[in-house]
């Protein structure tokens, strides 16, 4: 069975970059009837917060990404300790005592010599007496994984064949001096224990993947199939990472972006296939192909979400929005008419509020000085309420006869005076909804 996972750290609200990873893993699992696991990388207890877990669950629910089970790494610490002992016994874990300052000096020296800043394994051959002496100085040991110095190779589902020389990579730190289990280790143990078969994640994890393949094998596991998607940039190719906080799913939801618009863009962005609005989750599942994605950085423009949202919203039937319309205070007898008028003139459902405010409270008239007397004369010819769909034609005919105006010189000043806008719905549809006409 296919098993995938999404493993965010609950140290902030998830953003579009996180979503891309989550969606790809979700779609791969669903295509084969497999299992999709939500796994919280919450071993950093200082930065992990319940509010971010709650926010993550709200975001996934809003998007309709249903996970089959949830795991928390903070509840698996005993298992990581057991795995650490296994690696120590196999000679693959060793304790180190260098301070951050000492490590930085080593890195700088190697760089100045034109060499890669790879850890020199100085701690690998420490005697127990030397370790005891370091502890007596007040130093706390941290643990590194001893890599086999060979080429690590795999066929990546997006990038293709990858080969990394382990000698060009530092032995990774897996447990910090304060005992915190780091992502590289906890994730490897989990992926083996949980039978994960496919992992899709960002291209910035390629080196992590090389070391994790060795860790998984050292634990007796079989590495899954990996695919590394491209990283997102801004619309001009600029670095996006600093803007991701402003592109949180929470904020996009508040802006009125529709889930299916967001999912449709993320399911195709960076692939060779055109972005199209999907009408259901099943459409997304059926149309997803990891092999169509490229490795080059992918431009993401939040503005691209607006036409997709508009397309989705304008296709909604009245039944899908009637509760939201009622919440605006639209009378039940006018609700369906209001939707038929508003839907062609909005981008998000949030935009309905402005239209109902116009209809219920009136608009500040836009009137040129040259049109002021004309509009006042036209207002005097307005027929008594109730106004119907036919009122606009009857009224403008009377105004035309009384003033001699016609065409845009007739219709445009009246629209601007009644709605405060240069464009909008058909005025024959507006008048039956317009409850207040402000004087000119």
Image (tube, rainbow, N blue to C red):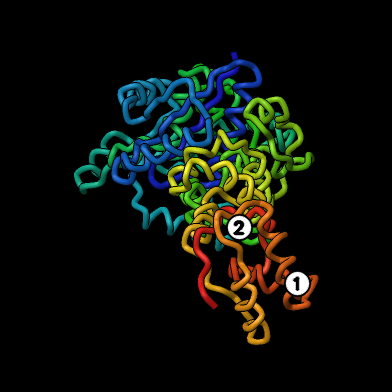
Quarter containing the N terminus: top right
Image: 220 above or below 52:
above
SS category of the residue bearing label 2: loop
x and y, in percent, of residue 343 in the image: 63, 48
- Earlier in the chain: of badge 1 and badge 2, it is 1
Residue 18 in view of the camera: yes
View extreme (top): residue: 1
Mark 1, secondary structure of its residue: helix
Q: Nearer the viewer, residue 197 or 137?
A: 197
Q: Residue furthest bottom?
A: 369
In percent of width and height, residue 199 lies at 58, 29
At 38% across and 55% down in the image, what residue appears? 102
Query: In the image, what residue occupies the spot 72% across and 69% down?
Result: 411
Residue at the disc numbered 1: 400
Q: Which label belongs to residue 431?
A: 2
313 horizontally vs 397: left or right: left
Q: Is residue 109 left or right of residue 301?
A: left
Residue depicted at 41% across the width and 33% down the height: 40
Q: Position of residue 82 (x, y in %)?
A: 34, 21
Q: CA distance from mark 1 to mark 2?
A: 18 Å
Query: Quarter holding the C terminus?
Result: bottom right
In the image, is residue 179 above or below residue 344? above
Q: Quadrant of residue 395?
A: bottom right
Q: Please state which of residues 418 and 126 is positioned toward the viewer in this rendering.
A: 418
């Amino acid at each position: 069975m296919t098993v995938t996972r999404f493993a965010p750290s609950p140290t902030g609200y998830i953003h579009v970059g996180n979503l891309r990873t989550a969606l790809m893993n979700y779609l791969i699992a669903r295509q084969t009837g497999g299992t999709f696991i939500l796994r919280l990388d919450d071993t950093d207890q200082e930065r992990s917060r319940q509010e971010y877990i709650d926010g993550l669950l709200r975001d996934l629910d809003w998007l309709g990404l249903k996970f089959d089970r949830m795991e928390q790494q903070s509840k698996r610490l005993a298992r990581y300790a057991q795995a650490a002992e296994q690696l120590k016994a196999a000679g693959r874990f060793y304790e180190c005592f260098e301070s951050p300052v000492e490590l930085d000096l080593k890195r700088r020296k190697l760089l100045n010599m034109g060499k890669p800043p790879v850890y020199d394994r100085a701690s690998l051959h420490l005697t127990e007496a030397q370790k005891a002496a370091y502890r007596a100085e007040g130093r706390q040991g941290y643990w590194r994984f001893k890599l086999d110095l060979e080429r690590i190779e795999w066929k990546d589902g997006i990038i293709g064949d990858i080969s990394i020389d382990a000698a060009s990579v530092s032995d990774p730190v897996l447990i910090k001096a304060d005992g915190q289990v780091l992502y590289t280790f906890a994730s490897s143990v989990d992926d083996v224990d949980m039978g994960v078969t496919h992992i899709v994640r960002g291209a910035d994890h390629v080196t992590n993947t090389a070391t994790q393949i060795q860790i998984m094998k050292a634990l007796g596991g079989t590495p899954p199939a990996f695919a590394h998607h491209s990283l997102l940039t801004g619309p001009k190719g600029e670095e996006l990472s600093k803007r991701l906080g402003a592109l949180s799913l929470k904020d996009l939801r508040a802006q009125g972006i529709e889930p299916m618009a967001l999912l449709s863009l993320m399911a195709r962005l960076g692939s060779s296939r055109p972005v199209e609005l999907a009408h259901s989750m099943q459409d997304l599942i059926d149309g997803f192909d990891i092999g169509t994605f490229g490795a080059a950085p992918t431009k993401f423009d939040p503005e691209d979400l607006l036409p997709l949202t508009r397309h989705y919203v304008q296709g909604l039937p009245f039944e899908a929005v009637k509760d939201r319309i009622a919440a605006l205070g639209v009378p039940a007898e006018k609700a369906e008419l209001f939707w038929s008028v508003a839907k062609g003139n909005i981008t998000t459902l949030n935009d309905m509020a402005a239209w109902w405010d116009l209809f219920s409270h009136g608009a500040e008239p836009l009137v040129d000085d040259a049109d002021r007397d004309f509009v006042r004369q036209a207002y005097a010819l307005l027929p008594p309420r109730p106004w119907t769909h036919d009122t606009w034609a009857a009224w403008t005919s009377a105004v035309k006869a009384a003033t001699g105006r016609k065409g845009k010189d007739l219709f445009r000043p009246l629209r601007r005076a009644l709605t405060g806008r240069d464009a909008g719905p058909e005025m024959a549809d507006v008048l039956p909804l317009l409850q207040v006409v402000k004087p000119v």
